[in-house]
Amino acid sequence: MAVILPLSLVAIAVFLTLYAWPAIHFNGWGFLVHNDWDLGRMYGNPIVKDGQTILPGASYGILFLIVGTLLSSLIAIILALPLGVFSAIFIAEGLKGPLREAASFLVELLAAVPSVVYGLFGYIVLIPFLGHHVYPFLTQTIGRVIPWFGGESGSGYGLLTAGFILTLMIVPLISATLRDALNSTPRALRESGISMGASRMEVVLRILLPQNRKVLIGATILALGRALGETMAVLMVSGNALNVLPSNAYSSVSTMASFIVSQLDSALQDPTGMAVMSLAEVGLVLMLISILVNAAARALLSLSGMRGRVKT
């Protein structure tokens, strides 16, 4: 039974590789470093190029998707990690009795909200508010110091809005996981710290959090994985830019997962099938990025464990 999940992952990777192989062969490394996604002339006669049948003018490059995916997920993690940690500490250590139960239920409820609901909230509430009030203010204040926040503030769609929506979606995941770990920490650890004269916050920061660093890293991995693969909510607020890299924090972007959904209908109209196979290659790249992120996080986890043993 333990090998079912790894075998499933391998099976998915093999299927995507085999299905997308003609596109991999046709696109080459330029697929990763060019911004030139073009399905070609849909009503033109297919041609043969580099041994593959494609539509005239078709080309496929996804650098703008890779950049949009990584930047939006990075923004989400930067914002969500401190919010998730401090909310978990507040619920586990600051609240008691019914208040703790109510707060815990609320966090778990937020984690269960469908992504399309977050997308609707972003579309109806966040985009008008951010576009009309927050982003113009940021351009006139922070933007004067940090150029990335300067320039045109846009209409509310874009990279920063996508990052905010992803933050709302992954904060409950980090908070709930760390809260459960804090609640499960032996009471003797807290009492030993307090008996040595440490305050409650010092006990949390110097004893409880280091004790649960593996849980925190694991929760961060899960949260980042959700941010990288989120589709509908990002599709509704990102602006769905095509072949353009973001010039500032308010620029419209596209992510790999949302792009697959938005382009699938058009790709299915390609009689050669190359467009759909290229979308499968996008999915394969996204999967590889997720695996690399998990591998890096596990390496960090192992490194932190080794350092902890050395100190001990």
Image (cartoon, rainbow, N blue to C red):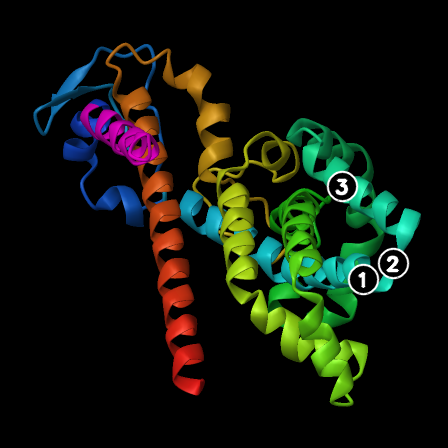
> Which residue matches tag 1?
90
Q: Residue at x 61, y 53 (%)?
A: 76
Residue 270 appears in which quarter of the rendering? Answer: top left
Q: Residue at x 9, y 29 (%)?
A: 50
| Disc 1 residue type (three-letter) | Phe
In the image, residue 191 sits, relative to residue 103, either above or below, namely below
In the image, residue 51 sits, relative to residue 68, either above or below, namely above
- The CA span between labels 3 and 2 is 34 Å
Q: Residue furthest right?
A: 98
**Is residue 119 among the parts visible in the rendering?**
yes
Q: Earlier in the sequence, mark 3 or mark 2?
A: 2
SS at badge 3: helix
Q: Say left or right for 171 vs 93.
A: left
Q: Residue at x 32, y 10 (%)?
A: 43
- The CA span between labels 3 and 1 is 30 Å
x then y, percent, for residue 201: 77, 77
Q: Are marks 1 and 2 in contact (CB under 8 Å)?
A: yes
SS at badge 2: loop
Q: Classify 10 Å Cα crowding around label 3: few (below 14), some (14-19), many (20 and above).
A: many
Q: Which residues are magenta?
A: 1-18
Residues 165 and 172: in front is 172
x then y, percent, for residue 49: 12, 26
The label nearer to you, 3 versus 1, is 1
Q: Say left or right for 10 vs 26.
A: right
Q: Classify 10 Å Cα crowding around label 1: few (below 14), some (14-19), many (20 and above).
A: some
Residue 295 appears in which quarter of the rendering? Answer: bottom left
| Disc 3 residue type (three-letter) | Ile
> Which residue matches tag 3?
127
In the image, residue 1 sits, relative to residue 206, either above or below, namely above
